[in-house]
Amino acid sequence: MSADPDVVALFAGVGGLLVAASIAGRVLSRRAQSDSARRTVANLNARTRAWWVMVAVFALSLWVGRIGSVVLFGLMSFLALREFVTLAPTRRGDHRALFWTFFAVTPAQYVLVAREWYGLYSIMIPVYAFLLLPTRSAIAGDTERFLERTAKIQWGLMLCVYCLSHVPALLSLRIPNYEGENAKLLFFLVTVVQMSDVLQYVFGKLFGRHKIAPNVSPNKTWEGFVGGIAAATALGAGLWWMTPFSPLEAAGLSLAITLAGFAGGLVMSAIKRDRGVKDFGTLIEGHGGILDRIDSLCFAAPVFFHLVRYAYT
Amino acid sequence: MIAGLVAMLSRTIAGANVRWVDVPRRDGPKVYFANHSSHLDTLVLWAALPRELRERTRPVAARDYWGATGARRWLAESVFRAVLIERKEIRRTSNPLGPMLAVLERGESLIVFPEGTRGDGERIGPFKGGLYHLARHRPEADLVPVHIDNLNRILPKGEFLPLPLLSCISFGPALHLGPDEPRENFLRRAEEAVRGLGAREGTERTGSLILEAPRGSARGAQA
């Protein structure tokens, strides 16, 4: 258990933001006139309520310490993979390979992260799971759509488990003059990426006109992209004092992770479009499934991890 | 209490998202009929029903599977009070229709799988005649089509370890046998009702750990 005063102050800040959002939601719901406005406000309020819960869970995991974060992100990987595989049809021949994916590979990845075994957790899925899982499916003997089925399992595993596990892996980086403070690095990554999502949504709703990729996601506009990324980068730069970075470096890293996060949202939208669904699930009210909430984080986490690891350790 | 616990557990494992395209009447006998591709079908369909309906619903299950081991027999007899039937040898003395009709006569409901056996989950097989006989002998019973999606991937034929995926159970509007409706006609209509519920899922299929209560089940029952 640890309660770094900086972290407490940061969560107090986030709490204040949510109080403001909740009050604004109240006011808006009283003033909404048309049906569509009421729907938008109801969705906004559902999102805010879900944010309260997500922030509380995140705060609790950081307070418990390193194991808390590993367990939290491990569970998120499991649930995200569940949503991903549900939407990516496999066949009976993949049953055993999928069983191993869920109950052996996923827990093993997080055990390795908990034991800080960088040499193995950074290659276990891309090398060993990559080779073994299709072997198990091949032994089952069903060759129909084999390459496609294998690709789906690999993709789900890389995205939901491998990429996401880089968030708690941040806690094991040894940065000179920053020992014992890595929880703030994790807070920095999650806050900047999630706020970038929120700000892109807000700027898009307010000023959005020119769609970036109308076939993939009608909600992504150039105005939302530029405004959201710029604002989130500024926010990240403003949080430099809690990181081992200078203000300029914090801005550069924020830009990198918000761009990666944007790419994550775009790619996951393309997958949802391909599967003919709007959301990956219904676990989080107003947001959809857990994968809908963490798609940007999945893309941003390994990028952030490697940039910090190469430049600061 | 054990039944409630088992129901909750099965919904969680199967990540069951329940859709009510139409809400069944609260009283009166019903026959829920569904596509069949997994041993979990019986359990999860039963578990998807709200408690008031579930307590008055008895799945029809094959004795050769559900009577095979102690644990299964306990589940079938004590937890979901299954009507166990012989499917290996049907003689006049063991005609399965008798006990089913008796259940409906008491005002209770049944869960049946008219395909008769588990399919591969890719398509729905032709319905056997049992459903027609039930409808003919008990015209007052509501025949409720149910589509079960994705359970065949959670626990396919021939596997014994379930995958933690999400599934979707959809309940449709009740059917009745038309006056003088020929058997083939009725069975085709029933098949189409189940298939139709599945087709709609293609575009809006989502999963959830949370069971939705049937919308307006309290009000709708009287209406």
Image (cartoon, rainbow, N blue to C red):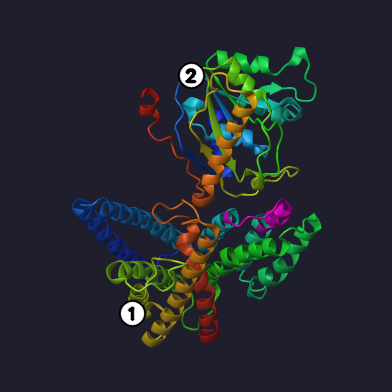
The residue positioned 57% from the left and 48% from the top of the image is: B166
User: Which residue matches tag 1?
Assistant: A234
Q: In this view, does B93 lie to the left or right of A79?
A: right
A297 inside magenta stretch? no
**Viewer-side label of 2, 1:** 2
- Frontmost residue, A118 versus A227: A227
Span of residues in magenta: A87-101
Say if B93 sits above or below A76 in the image: above
The residue positioned 28% from the left and 53% from the top of the image is: A36
Say if A82 sits above or below B92 in the image: below
Q: Looking at numbered disc 1 in the image, what kind of residue is underneath it? A: Ala
- Which chain's residue wears label 1? A
Crowding near pointer 2: few (<14 within 10 Å), some, many (20+)? Answer: some
Q: Main secondary structure of the magenta part?
A: helix
Callout 1: helix, strand or loop?
helix
Q: Real-space Cα distance between discs 2 and 1?
A: 64 Å
User: Residue B28 has which mark?
Assistant: 2
Q: Is residue A216 left or right of residue B128?
A: left
Number of callouts:
2
Q: In which quarter of the image is residue A210?
A: bottom left
| Quadrant location of the C terminus of chain B in the rendered image | top left
Image coords of residue B151 (percent x, y): 62, 43
- Frontmost residue, B195 versus A188: B195
* Residue at the extreme left: A31
- Whether residue A143 is visible here, answered yes or no, is yes
Q: Is residue B32 left or right of residue B39?
A: left
The residue positioned 54% from the left and 22% from the top of the image is: B178
Callout 2: helix, strand or loop?
loop
Q: Looking at numbered disc 2 in the image, what kind of residue is underneath it? A: Gly
- Whether residue B206 is visible here, answered yes or no, is no
Q: In which quarter of the image is residue B137?
A: top right
